[in-house]
Image: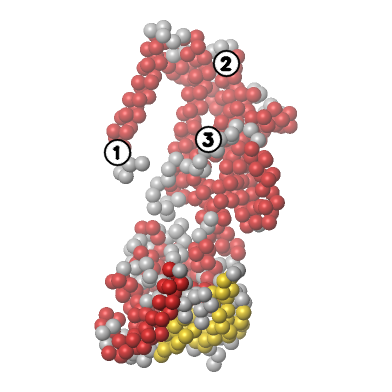
Amino acid sequence: MSETAPKRGPVLAWRIALGAAFLLAWQGGVNAKLLDKFFFSRPSDVIARVWMWIVSGTIWPHLAVTVTEALLSFTIGALLGIAGGFLLARLPWLAAVCDPYVKIANSLPRVVLAPIFLLWFGLGIWSKVALGVTVVFFIVFFNTYQGVREVDPVVLNNARMLGASERQLIRHVLIPSALTWIFSSLHVSIGFAIIAVVVGEYLGASKGIGYTIAQAEGVFDTTGVFAGMAILAAFVLLVGEGVSRLERWLLRWKPAAHGAGGDSRDNVV
Amino acid sequence: MAPAIALRGVAKRFPGYTALEDITLDIPAGRFLSIVGPSGCGKSTLLNMTAGLSRPSEGAIEIFGEELAGINRRASYMFQQEALLPWKTVRENIQLGLTFRGREGRAAAEQAAAWIHRVGLDGFAASYPYQLSGGMRKRVSMAQCWIVEPEMVLMDEPFAALDVHTRLRMQSEILALWTGSGKTVVFVTHDLEEAISLSDEVVVLSAGPASGMIGRYAVDLPRPRPLIDIKTEPRFVELYRAIWSDLRGEVLKSYERNRA
C-alpha cells in the first residue's frame, strides 16, 4: 500500500494501454496463425458478433432474463440475509442452536443444488433465482450478523442514555452500524448473484446469457462464447459502478472511500 | 428534599474481583461534585451504576428518593470515548434526545439550531463527526447531553483526550452551562487540578481493588471562577495540598500494584 493514492489520469492511460496490448496480442497471435482461430476466435470477430447481436436485437431478451434473475435473487437473498443476521445477532441463544446448521448449509457447493432447483422450480427463471438466493443470503447474512454484534457499545449506551427505546436503538444505531458491513460486501454479493444465475442458465434454461453461451459452446462457436462473456463482463462492470455510487452515498458519513468490498468467500458456486 | 443522588452501601463485584466496596454518598441537587482517584479505582464503574447502565452487586442507588431500576431517565451521560453516532450529522446528533422522545418538527429543529449556536458550531450543522476536531466533537456531545434538560449530568473524564488549551476552554464552557442551571453534575476525573477548579466538592476514592471513599472535601473557592488564573490562588494551592496528601498514597499504591 502506498501512502498517496495513485493519480487518476496516468492510471487510466495505463489501464487502456494494458487492455489494448492484450487484445492486440490476441488478434496478432491468431492472424499470425500462432493461435488456432477455431479454439481462440479473434477480438475483431467477437466485437463484430456483439455488435450484430445488439443491432439485430437478438441479445436483449436474453440479457433481460439474466438481469431479472440476478436482481430478484439479489433482492430476496439480501432481505432474507439481513433479517436472519439481525435475528441471530439479537438472540444469542438461537444463534448457538443454529450455528452448526448454518455452517453445514454454507459449506455446500451451490452448483450441486442447481439440478435439485431445476426439479423443484422448473426450467424458468425461479430455479436460477433460487440458486442466486442461496449465494447472496449467506454473504449478507454473515455481514449483517457481524455488523449488529460489533456495534460500538459506547455509542449504544449513549443512545440508551438519551432515551432510545429498543425499536429506536434498532433503527438509529443497529441498522446504520450493520449497513457498513452489508454494503462492504454488496459488490461481492451482486457479482455472485450474477455468476449463480448464469451457471443456472448454463445448466438448463431456455433463455438468458448463460443459455446463449451454452448454445454457442454446443456448436463449437467460440466466437459466440466469448461474445457472451464480453456482454456479461460489461454488465457486471456497470452494476459494480452503480453499487459503488450507492455505497458512496449511503456511507457518506465515513471518512475514507471504501476498498473494493468485503472478502470473497471461496467455494461460493 | 431528597438528595439528587444517594448511594447506599454500594458495592460492585465482577467474577474474582471486587471493584468497589461500601460506597455511601449523598449528592444534593444542584451540586457540582468531582470524583478523583488513581486509575483503575472504579470511578467509571460508580458513574455507570449511577447512570443505570450497570447494577450494583450490593446496596442501592436512589435518585431523588426513588430507588433506581433500569436506565436513569433523569440523567445525561457524557462519555470519555467517542459516543456520537458517526452516521448522523451534527444537527441530527444534537437533536437525538429529542427525536427519541418523539419531539420532531419545527420546534425541535429550532432548539437544535439554538444549541448548535450555543456550543459555537454554526456552519457545521450538516457536518459528520469525522469532519470535526476532537474539541468540536466534545461540544456536540455536550449539546447532545444538555438539550434534553436533564436534572443531572454525569461526566466520565470527558476532556481526557483533549490538549491542554482545548481542555481549558471546554472546562469554562461546562461551567458556563452549569452556572445557574440548578443541575447536579457528577464529574469523574483523574486530574485533581481539574476537579478542584470546577467543583463544589471533591470525593477521593482509594486505589482498587475494593476501592472505597477516603475523603470528601468542600471546595470553597468563590464563583464565578477564572479558570486561567485559579491554579495560582493561595486557597487553590492549599486545597490541592490537602487533597493530594490523601490521593498521593493511593496513587503510589496503585502504581505499586500495577507494577507487581
Q: Neighbour class for label 2 at 10 Å: few (<14), some, many (≥20)?
A: some
Question: What residue is rendered at 70% in x and 27% in y?
Answer: A115
Q: Amino acid at mark 2?
A: Glu
Q: x, y percentage for residue A152?
A: 50, 60
Q: x, y percentage for residue A173?
A: 53, 60
Q: Which residue is mark 2?
A: A217
For the question of whether residue A140 can be seen, the reply is: yes
Q: Quadrant of the N terminus of chain A?
A: top left
Mark found first going from the N terminus, 3 or 2:
3
Q: Quadrant of the C terminus of chain A?
A: top right
Q: Amino acid at mark 1?
A: Lys
Q: Is residue A240 left or right of residue A93?
A: left
**Residue A191 has which mark?**
3
Q: Quadrant of residue A140?
A: top right
Residue A92's place in the image compared with A197, above or below, is below
Q: Amino acid at mark 3?
A: Gly
Mark found first going from the N terminus, 2 or 1:
1
Q: Alpha carbon of mark 3 to alpha carbon of mark 2: how far?
A: 23 Å
Q: x, y percentage for residue B153?
A: 47, 78
Q: Secondary structure at mark 3?
A: helix
